[in-house]
Amino acid sequence: MARTDTAKAAEKTTADLEKQIETLTKDVAALATAMKADAKAKSNQLGEAASETLDIARQKGVETAELARQQTRDAVAVAEQTVRANPGAAVGVAALAGFVTGIVASRR
């Protein structure tokens, strides 16, 4: 009779362990699913933040390029006015610049 009671206790313990392992397996699967969903949500958030940052950078680039164009136009207009007002000085400066460029180029 003692052996029968021991065998029944072992079977009960084995059945309990199997139930616990099954429960643990389900809990681990649920945890993995939750972690995957959380990672996907964070990935989406990061993607949206990166997209917003890219849009802002693109807009600032467009604004900077337009500002540079306008400043270039203004500089060309000022240079044109200066050359028209002082044509002799403009020719002298251009000749000097050509002379210096020629000297630098001939030394190489």
Image: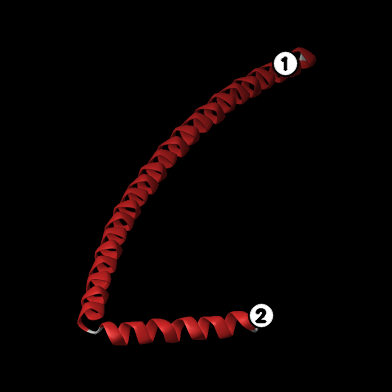
Residue at x-position 47% and y-position 38% = 39
* 1 or 2: mark nearer the eye: 2
Return the x and y of residue 41 as percentages of the image width and height: 40, 37
Disc on res. 86: none
Give residue 64's quadrant in the image. Answer: bottom left
Measured as percent of width and height from the top left, residue 83 is found at: 26, 79
**Image height check: is 68 above or below 37?**
below
Q: Is residue 57 left or right of residue 10?
A: left
Identified at 53% across, 32% down, the residue is 32
- Up the image or down, 103 lies above or below 79; here it is below
Task: Residue 38: name its quadrant.
Answer: top left
Q: Which circle marks residue 5 in the picture?
A: 1
Label 2 sits on residue: 108
Quadrant for the C terminus in the image: bottom right
Residue 29, x across and y down, in percent: 55, 27
Quadrant for the N terminus, please.
top right
Q: Position of residue 99 (x, y in %)?
A: 50, 85
Q: Identity of the amino acid at label 1?
A: Asp
Q: Residues within 10 Å of mark 2 (few under 14, many from 20)?
A: few
Q: Nearer the viewer, residue 13 or 76?
A: 76
- The answer to whether 77 appears left or right of 54 in the picture is left
Residue drawn 57% across and 85% down?
103
On screen, residue 89 versus residue 85, left or right, reads: right
Which comes sooner in the sequence, label 1 or label 2? 1
| Cα–Cα span, label 1 and label 2 | 104 Å
Q: Residue at x 25, y 73 (%)?
A: 80
What is the secondary structure assignment of the residue under circle 1?
A: helix
Instruction: For mark 2, give the secondary structure.
Output: loop
Q: Nearer the viewer, residue 53 or 45?
A: 53
> Which of 4/64 is in front?
64
The kind of residue tagged 2 is Arg
Of residues 50 and 107, the one drawn nearer to the viewer in this rendering: 107
